[in-house]
Amino acid sequence: MNLKEVVGINLKYYRYQSGLSQEKFYTNLELNPKYMACIERGEENLTIDYIEEIAKKLNISTYELVTYNENHLILKKRIDEKEKINN
């Protein structure tokens, strides 16, 4: 697993835990929700500045956003299913 995938998994996990949809969360950050969906899938890179900004908005450390956590990977699959149902 590469760093892009780790950040994407953690980003989706913490965003979901905050109770926000992609659209609502990323619009508040003035980021394109479609682009950020690619980030959450591990397909695109975020700059360090955005990693720091997103971590602050999620009230987590940048370390938590870039560190692999197997539990987040497991829960991401459940989150994906829930978000498909809600959309």
Image (cartoon, grey):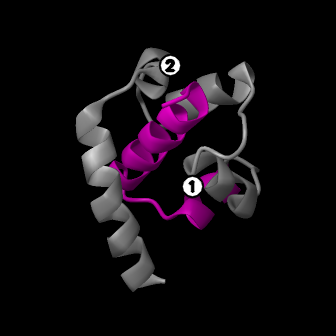
* Residues rendered magenta in the picture: 1-28
What x and y, as percent, mark residue 34?
A: 72, 63
Give how far apart the Cα atoms at labels 2 and 1 are: 17 Å
57 magenta-colored: no
Query: Tag 2: residue type?
Result: Thr
**82 shown above or below 46:** below
Tell which residue pokes out farthest to the front in this image.
1
What x and y, as percent, mark residue 77?
A: 33, 59
| Contact between labelled residues 1 and 2, with CB atoms less than 8 Å apart | no
Query: Tag 1: residue type?
Result: Phe
User: Of 28 and 15, which appears nearest the observer?
Assistant: 15
9 magenta-colored: yes
Seen at 43% across and 38% down, the residue is 10
Mark 1, residues whose alpha carbon is within 10 Å: few (<14), some, or many (≥20)?
many
- Residue indicated by mark 1: 25
Question: Which mark is on residue 13?
Answer: none
Seen at 27% across and 34% down, the residue is 70
**87 shown above or below 67:** below
Seen at 72% across and 35% down, the residue is 45
Earlier sequence position, callout 2 versus callout 1: 1
The secondary structure making up most of the magenta span is: helix
Q: Horizontally, is 57 left or right of 50 in the view?
A: left
**71 shown above or below 86:** above
Mark 2, residues whose alpha carbon is within 10 Å: few (<14), some, or many (≥20)?
some
- Residue indicated by mark 2: 62
Q: Horizontally, is 59 left or right of 39 in the view?
A: left
At mark 2, the secondary structure is helix
What x and y, as percent, mark residue 31?
A: 75, 50
Tell which residue pokes out farthest to the top in this image.
63
Seen at 50% across and 19% down, the residue is 62
What x and y, as percent, mark residue 75?
A: 26, 51
